[in-house]
Amino acid sequence: MKRLHLPLLILILSGIALGIFYHKAVNLGFPLLPAQQTDNWVVEARVSFEPTGGAVTARFFIPENPPGMALLEEHFISRGYGLTTTPTGPNREAVWTTRWPSGPQAVYYRATVYPLEQPRADQAPYPGPVAQPELEEPYRSAAEEVVQKVRERSADITSFATVLVRDMNHPADENMQLFVSATDSDREKVRTAIQLLAGARIPARMAHGIQLTDRGNDLQPETWLEVHNTRSWVAIDPDDGTVGYPDDFLVWWRGDTPPVRLDRARDAQVRFSVAHNYQNAVEVARQKADLLDSRMADFSLLELPVQTQNMYRVLLLVPLGAMIIVLLRNVVGLQTFGTFMPVLIALSFRETSLLGGIILFSLIVSLGLAIRFYLEKLKLLLVPRLASVVIVVILLMLALSILSHNLGIEHGLTVALFPMVILAMTIERMSIVWEEHGPADTLRQGIGSLAVAAVCYLVMINPYIDHLFFVFPELLLIVLALTLLLGRYTGYRLTELVRFRAFGGGER
């Protein structure tokens, strides 16, 4: 069991991280790439009317869970009005009220909608067979004949409605011609289709919506037919019988009623406008999480203050740099001064640039090492000697900053971004290695430290990695799992294979 403890821990950590990552990326739509934008639409309805005296109530249907779309934001714009939103049958309506209106009035409803990649099914309970309409002759006999002919050429409710709509658009016999004419509008055709479908006991209703287009001023609502197939409502295009709404169609309200109802007002007019909008994909995912009542976004770094977010953008990359150091030391075999010194130096390189940072680091360490050898002759104790080295490092950094400023070398000013204590400890460690193992080992470990710091820097400045670890911090569990896995590695290092290749050749 002890032998399986670590593998099981690695699998659990990886499983938790991948599960959270999948939910946020696939279900909530958090972007995998930085600065990714999502297409959405800003839809606005302007409702204007003329008061006739007294308190005014304006009721206006607004979208609710439109098929294929998600409502991200809603804004109600009106001055001096009270506002409530209430469900009304299959619709939702906004109710504006005011007591003493004066002159022409206008209220606005604005929403941001987002096309869903996987449209949700309109799961609605089956209302049951509808009652047949009471028609007089010859309409009654004609309706029965139309229903009979359509039933012979259809297989289910959806195909029945499709065949019926196509026959209505191209009436071939006198029975259909009693109900439709070439001048009928879509609304009249849908009204007739609902009546004929009722003759077959099929529940149907009228739906209205707008086409989302870049030329989106003064849009007119389009009317569609919806039939219930005992499982869900299915949309039918009244022009050609096509099944399903287009991807860029927003269902606004349902029913054979106007979208506006007024009390003590007249001359209601509605103007629909649409604008194409691009929004940061992270913001869209956060809003989508709110719509889905997901608590995942509440525990995201995106909810922290901006200053704290910027701090964690850096801190989240430190574990990744630490894993890279483990890989390069335990598997590749590079030697470094200290365990975490290279990753801290790499963080400094983010501000100084790679080449300038290497030059400044080498210069500070070389000068500090020379002064450290001088302090050795003074026979100081350890703590005073370290304190002296820290003071000397700060003086060297100050001198380099002043000198570079006078010479017009702006990169020299960034030397203050190096961690001074780490520099002091590095100088102390290099002097000890120099005394115990000679300058060759010191130079080898120094070059190894800079090489590891450079690799960490190149990884940590990658905008894709920065974005992934900030938006998906659960990936740190993968980093932890890989670090634990590397902690069990006891095989040959790559540098050892190069060093001892002569022994392998001798055996052959």
Image (cartoon, rainbow, N blue to C red):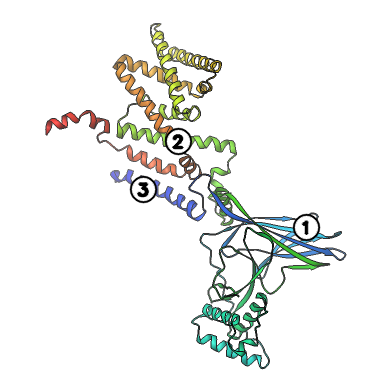
Front: mark 1 or 3: 1
Question: Sequence-wise, which precedes: disc 3 or disc 2?
Answer: 3
Q: Which residue is mark 2?
A: 460
What is the three-letter code of the residue carrying label 3?
A: Leu
What is the three-letter code of the residue carrying label 1?
A: Gly
Q: Is disc 3 surrounded by few (<14), some (14 to 19) or many (20+) residues within 10 Å? A: few
Instruction: Determine whether the residue tagged by mark 1 lies in a helix, strand or loop.
Output: strand
Residue 248: which quarter of the image? bottom right
Q: Which residue is mark 3?
A: 11
Q: CA distance from mark 1 to mark 2?
A: 52 Å
216 lies above or below 146: above
Q: Residue furthest left?
A: 508
Label number found at residue 101:
none
Whole-percent x and y of residue 347? 47, 30
Whole-percent x and y of residue 218? 71, 62
Q: Is disc 2 surrounded by few (<14), some (14 to 19) or many (20+) residues within 10 Å? A: many
What is the three-letter code of the residue carrying label 2?
A: Met
Instruction: Determine whether the residue tagged by mark 2 lies in a helix, strand or loop.
Output: helix
Q: Residue furthest top?
A: 378
Name the residue nearer the viewer: 277 or 216: 216
Question: Sequence-wise, which precedes: disc 1 or disc 2?
Answer: 1
Question: Sequence-wise, which precedes: disc 1 or disc 3?
Answer: 3
Label number found at residue 82:
1
What's the residue at 29%, 43% (across, down)? 2
Q: Quadrant of the C terminus?
A: top left
Q: CA distance from mark 3 to mark 2?
A: 26 Å
Q: Are marks 3 and 2 in contact (CB under 8 Å)?
A: no
